[in-house]
Amino acid sequence: MTDLINNVDGLIKNDVNYVQSIINKFSAVLQDTKPERQIPYLAYIINICVNYINEKHKDLSADWKAWSVVVIRNQYLKGKVKKEDDIPKIIDEFVTFWKTDYEKYCENIIAVTEYDRDRGFVFRYEKKIGS
């Protein structure tokens, strides 16, 4: 996490306009972030996620793209994302897990809403990787 934090701290110091632009870009997602000091870091991480997912995982639905970002956010907040290179690896692992396990998961689960079903799947993935 130190490398990632240092990168963002450097951007805040040297290119605050860039940092503010990505915060503004993702303001709807970041608006309830607590503690607020995490906002620039999460904006930077989300920007990396969105760019990577749109480049490498175009076939994913918007929902699963969003869930991939949620996984990264959760991993970052738990201190498991140490550097930028961790982000694509985690996304790829999550997408692979989704492609191989999601249908089987859905066959064995009862959920009131799609959100509950899919959040449970994300929780299962996070439990699998030790979060």
Image (cartoon, helix red, strand yellow):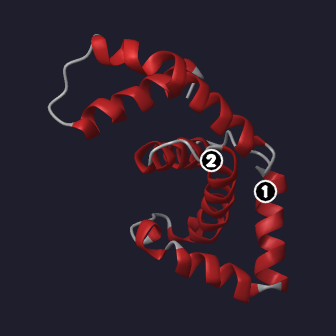
> Which residue appears farthest toward the left when viewing the image?
112
The label on residue 41 is none
Q: Name the amino acid type tagged 1.
A: Leu
* Label 2 Cα neighbours within 10 Å, binned few <14 / some 14-19 / many ≥20: many
x and y percentages locating residue 128 in the rendered image:
54, 18
Is label 1 in contact with label 2 (beta carbons under 8 Å)?
yes
Answer with left or right where residue 122 lies relative to residue 83: left
User: What SS does tag 2 mark?
Assistant: helix
x and y percentages locating residue 72 in the rendered image:
59, 45
* Residue holding disc 2: 76
Q: Name the amino acid type tagged 2.
A: Tyr
x and y percentages locating residue 46 in the rendered image:
60, 60
- Occupied quadrant, residue 79: top right
Residue at position x 47%, y 75% from top?
Answer: 27
- Occupied quadrant, residue 33: bottom left
Between 99 and 17, the one lying in front of the other is 99
* Residue holding disc 1: 4
For marks 1 and 2 on the same chain, the one whose residue lies earlier in the sequence: 1
Residue at position x 73%, y 36% from top?
Answer: 89
Between 102 and 59, the one lying in front of the other is 59
Between 83 and 109, the one lying in front of the other is 109
x and y percentages locating residue 23 in the rendered image:
57, 77
- Occupied quadrant, residue 16: bottom right
> Which residue appears farthest toward the front when viewing the image?
59
Point out the image quarter for the C terminus: top right
Residue at position x 83%, y 65% from top?
Answer: 7
Answer with left or right where residue 53 lies relative to residue 101: right
Answer with left or right where residue 50 lies relative to residue 84: left
47 above or below 80? below
